[in-house]
């Protein structure tokens, strides 16, 4: 019913249009998430979690790396407090990312920003951030909300299927698909670097800091936070004030 | 026990994600902080790619590096990001024969 109405009302048609564009922009994330979510479901099932528990974790936490860590800690018999602290350390980087994303969405209402912030992951953040112009378009919130929801549903659905059916993808293919999210990050970074070559320095500083700190024994979580903050700090001198079209 | 771990994880993950939505509504950042925040996506991409990509095949880190170079090449040719992803997956698949 709503769909037939929207054809006659241009206002909601452009809402629907923005939501469709958001889902299309989120599709590469689905491709990256599905094999990872299936693997998570399988491993979580093997660790002794029930299907409802492992799906609930995806629904409430929505953070791949932390969920894998939790599964391996549950298998190793770790306590809840240890698992929660580890998740905090690993996910604190989302604070930095959310601050960057929310600061960009100045034209979007607080009411819309709040639920979107909950769906922020490495993938939804980087994909959304590199789709900048939609933030200034009418109904931009529908674009980002739809992008995030597409990613979220594939994560939750993939976790459930992995837990319920076990390995549905041949193991060699699913192992190969482990590179998908890295390839997606590369596919997001390169067009910006081609446009403004100096952006590569921001990324290289972040990589180097992250690599050195992990080699010195700092946890992956804090190393990524430090790399992201220091790499980003170089942007103070590297980026223009307008920044929008970069 | 597991249910409390899940709820605790959900809280410590959600709070850092939500807090900035409140902060940006009440704090006005100077220009240089705006530039810092605008550079965060590129820095995050860098930190997320390396050294993590080395662990695509932990026993053979060169496979991740080569697949990453395939991805860079395909992206440099302005191909759609789906092609970049599929190309990198295919290169890992072929290298693990």
Image (spheres, rainbow, N blue to C red):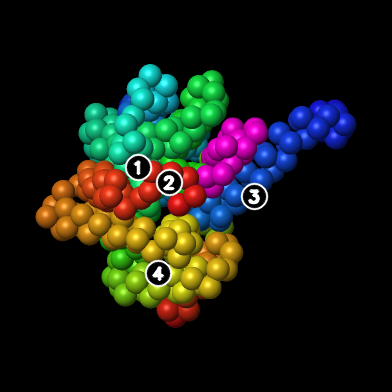
The reply to whether dot 1 and dot 4 touch (C-beta < 8 Å) is no
Per the image, the residue denoted by label 3 is A24
Q: Residue tagged by mark 2?
A: A243
Residue A141 inside the magenta-drawn segment: yes
Helix, strand or loop under label 3:
helix
The quarter of the displayed image where residue A214 is located: bottom left
Instruction: Read off the chain for label 3.
Output: A
Q: Nearer the viewer, residue A69 or A46?
A: A69
Question: Helix, strand, or loop for circle 1?
Answer: helix
Q: Tell me where residue A175 sits by quadrant.
A: bottom left
CB contact under 8 Å: marks 2 and 1: yes
Distance between the alpha carbons at the discs numbered 2 and 1: 7 Å
Farthest residue in the front direction? A241
Q: Chain of mark 1?
A: B
Q: Is residue A78 above or below residue A46?
A: above
Identify the image quadrant of the N terminus of chain A. Answer: top right
Q: What residue range appears in magenta?
A: A131-155
Give the x, y percent position of residue A232: 30, 47
Q: In front of the other: label 3 or label 1?
A: 1
- Residues behind callouts 4 and 2 on a single chain: no
Q: Residue at x 87, y 31 (%)?
A: A8
Q: Is residue A32 visible?
A: yes
What secondary structure is marked by label 2? loop
Q: What main secondary structure does the magenta stretch of the protein show?
A: helix
Quadrant of the rendered structure where residue A16 is?
top right
What number is the disc on residue B35? 1
């Amino acid at each position: 019913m709503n769909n037939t109405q929207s054809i006659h009302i241009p206002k909601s048609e452009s809402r629907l249009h923005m939501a469709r564009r958001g889902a299309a922009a989120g599709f590469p994330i689905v491709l990256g998430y599905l094999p990872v979510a299936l693997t998570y479901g399988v491993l979580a099932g093997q660790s002794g979690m029930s299907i409802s528990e492992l799906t609930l974790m995806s629904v409430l936490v929505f953070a791949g790396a932390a969920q894998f860590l939790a599964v391996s800690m549950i298998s190793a018999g770790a306590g809840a407090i240890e698992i929660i602290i580890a998740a905090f350390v690993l996910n604190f980087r989302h604070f930095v990312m959310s601050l960057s994303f929310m600061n960009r969405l100045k034209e979007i209402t607080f009411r819309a920003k709040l639920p979107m912030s909950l769906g922020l992951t490495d993938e939804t953040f980087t994909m959304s951030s590199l789709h900048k112009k939609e933030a200034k378009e009418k109904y931009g919130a529908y674009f980002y909300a739809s992008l995030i929801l597409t990613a979220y549903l594939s994560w939750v659905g993939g976790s459930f299927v992995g837990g319920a059916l076990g390995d549905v993808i041949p193991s060699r293919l699913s192992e190969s698909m482990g590179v998908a999210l890295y390839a997606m990050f590369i596919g997001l970074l390169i067009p910006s670097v081609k446009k403004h070559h100096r952006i590569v320095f921001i990324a290289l500083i972040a990589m180097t800091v992250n690599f050195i700190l992990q080699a010195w024994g700092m946890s992956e979580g804090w190393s990524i936070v430090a790399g992201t903050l220091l790499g980003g700090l170089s942007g103070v001198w590297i980026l223009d004030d307008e920044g929008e079209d970069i | 026990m597991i249910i409390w771990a899940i709820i605790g994880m959900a809280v410590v993950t959600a709070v850092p994600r939500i807090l900035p939505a409140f902060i940006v509504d009440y704090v006005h950042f100077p220009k240089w902080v705006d530039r810092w925040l605008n550079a965060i996506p590129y820095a995050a991409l860098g930190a997320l790619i390396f050294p993590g990509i080395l662990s695509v095949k932990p026993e053979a880190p060169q496979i991740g590096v080569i697949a990453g170079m395939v991805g860079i090449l395909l992206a440099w040719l302005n191909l759609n990001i789906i092609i970049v992803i599929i190309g990198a997956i295919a290169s890992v698949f072929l290298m693990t024969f």
